[in-house]
Amino acid sequence: MIKANSYTFKILRYDAKEPGSRPRFATYRIKVIPGLTVLAVLIRIRDEIDGTLSFRCSCRSAVCGSCAMVINGKIDLACRTQVAIFDTDTIILEPLPNFEVIRDLVVDMTPFWQMYEKVQPYLIRHSPNPEKEIPQSEEERRRIDQYVNCILCACCYGACPVLARDPNYMGPAAAAKLERFVLDSRDERPADVLESVNDEHGVWGCDTVFRCIDACPKDVRPTDAFVGLRQEIVKKRFQKMLGKAKDEA
Amino acid sequence: MLNHDILIVGGGLTGLRAAVGLCDRFNVGLISKVYPTRSHSIAAQGGINAALTNNPDSRDDSWEKHTFDTIKGSDYLADQDAVEIMCKEAIKIVYEMEHWGCPFSRFPDGTIAQRPFGGAGYPRTCYSSDITGHVLLNTLYERAIAKGVKIYPEWFVTSLCIEEGQCHGVVALDIRTGELIPVRAKATFFGTGGYGRVYQHSTNALINTGSGIGMAYAAGAPLKDMEFVQFHPTCLIGTSILMTEACRGEGGYLFNNQGERFMQRYVPTAMELAPRDIVSRCIQTEINEGRGFDHPLGKYIQLDLRHLGAKKIIERLPGIRNISIDFIGIDPIIEPIPIMPCQHYSMGGIDVDKRCASDIHGFYAGGECSCVSVHGGNRLGGNSLLDTIVFGKLAAQAIAEDLEGGGALPDEKPLLKLKDEVEQKLGRLATPGRGKAYRIQAELGAVLDEKVGIFRTRKEMEQALQKIAGLKEEYRNVGVSSAARYMNFELINALELEYMLEVAHTITLGALLREESRGAHFRTDFKTRNDRDWLKHTIAKIGPDGEPVISFKDVTITRYQPMERKY
């Protein structure tokens, strides 16, 4: 038999639809066997103790990006975080920061998806497609690897200090997605597409303090994307100036 | 009431591909109970089959050979005309996905990389390391955004509206607001995924309840071949997380507690790359005969990747390595992975033809929730991602053809009536003092695992049927803790459970009636395939008394006469 240990879960609960409702911590005591994840415990609490507890989940294997939240002060996916890794028997769960809470651990993801859609997150090409695949070398494919891994869980968005003060800021995930296409050898987006993120709400807003990198459960480095996009914008601007200079000469 | 020409339910690969194919010409709405990128397609790891002949070892591969492998893998239950279409389309849709930006892994010559997979004569599985479902789903979602598909994220469809052989649309719950909304459409397409969660141990996401299948059945659409349930050979012990077949495709071994590569005794030529039904039975036999390893969470077999070396594991199977480390604290570079077989895929589903049309006018289905049938008794690895995209595309073509020349929206009265019924049901569920859904779901999962699993026998399945009937009785007394309808996931679970019970019922009844062993359906009391009596599809349709009525349908044979299935 596996020995179960007792844990105290403190979960920040709030219902935006309930008039006069204020965020409060609800406490649940539960016995947990080693190896159980925070998500598994949340499901048990909802099933066995309190059916009104609200949280999102789906894959339970850290690939779908549904269950990002703050776990003992650290942003992570509940499904990949084991209860036993903490040096304490108290686990505190809070909703992802930088979002409006809808209910309990469920936040309103709308602004996240709006930023995502704004960067034109898809391959743009003008050349006719070949009959077979568009050739891409292993090296070219490797260049986009880290950005391809993004699961859109919004851990980075919750961790970003810029978003805490500027809700109009594009945020790390959208930048990573944009860089994924800018770096893709097959993408042919015109240079002026980057103009939409060429301001302080866009690529120049990043503080480069790497909170997003710390928070990412998939080892994506959105800060690299900001640096890359800035360089690309500067490069394009220089090319334009030089091109103009040549024309004038 | 919302109106669309075409309503698509499901934001996975099938639903998105159908939407992308239709949105230019029709008013399309896509309902998904999660944000589309959370759909279970995201979790597919190993790859998608297409005879591209990019691999140096597959230069003389062809779609015909892919067809034959699929039919043989299906244990001759697949409809051969449909398999031909799928394997021919495979090449086109892989290139199409690439043109839309899908970041496949590449060979040194810049072509799409292909790896060997089980039951395939050639290495034809196109992949992106071990996150192929993730890259395909993201690419199609990106495409849907580019084309401005109207998506209703976090809407849950509670019921399908069919009256007198005509589909009118659905009633849906906006999970965020709690509002109940009838949605009317000329054509309704389900791409709602599989039913893995009716089993206790499944690789499937928690959202894979099969409620779409159960809902279609409850509304009067027939189901096909429900007894054919795929058990994946290699699932992580404890959590049942999938360890892709690519682990073996890349050269991984299976070991028992004697240190023996036991597949040698069962399938000496194909070894670890025999099809999934066979490998799962071998693993289960090893465990049953005492050659498994002991673990507090159950008995297991070792999946050993160590000899592949750190470089190959990190390059080709990085996700597998991360999952092993995160979920069981084992680094496959250093230690073997403890695995066991568990439920993975639904071969059966909503009975549709090769155009994805059901026998209900205006109702279509594709992908894992449907049964065309292209997988027959056993699906080959790498053919499910293929099925989702090919039949999403073909369904879009078929629906466009059928709606050619316009036509009026169906009558709204049946939808309004259905909405009232759902209102009443929600009211009933919110009455205080009722039982909890999760208990029933747990018992259901346990009984299917135990009695309708890899090895099946009459007595156990009769017991399972009795148990399911009892659980259906208990369900009538199920309730939820809160009458609030928004972000109430306990409520959604309770609504889905009703459909899960129907799905489980049809699986078990089909398995009890089919007195032979074919593909993933193995009867210890009827150990061989019996083509004379059972080369046919099982059809389950709900009867007037709410009980399933079973009939049978012929299998379409074109060029491949059934032979003994040897590897």
Image (tube, rainbow, N blue to C red):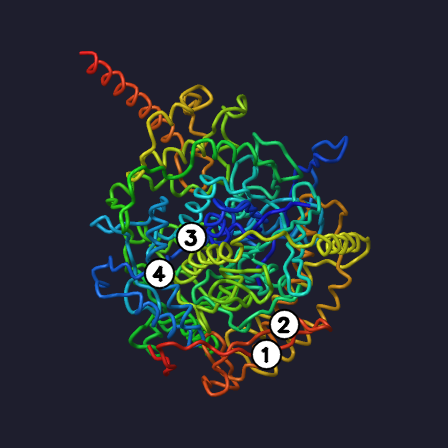
Three-letter residue code for mark 1: Ser
Question: Which of disc 2 and disc 1 is earlier in sequence?
Answer: 2
Q: Are marks 4 and 2 on the same chain?
A: yes
Instruction: Give the Cα separation between the discs numbered 3 and 4.
Output: 12 Å
Camera-nearest label, 4 or 1: 1
Q: Residue at x 31, y 73 (%)?
A: B270
Q: SS for tag 4?
A: strand
Q: Which residue extends farthest right?
A: B432
Task: Indicate the position of residue A249 as horizontal and vertical percent values.
Answer: 17, 11
Q: Are marks 1 and 2 on the same chain?
A: yes
Please report contact status of discs 1 and 2: CB closer than 8 Å, yes or no. yes
Instruction: Give the Cα separation between the discs numbered 4 and 1.
Output: 33 Å
Residue underneath mark 4: B49
Q: Which mark is residue B551?
A: 1
Question: Which of disc 4 and disc 3 is earlier in sequence?
Answer: 4
Three-letter residue code for mark 2: Lys
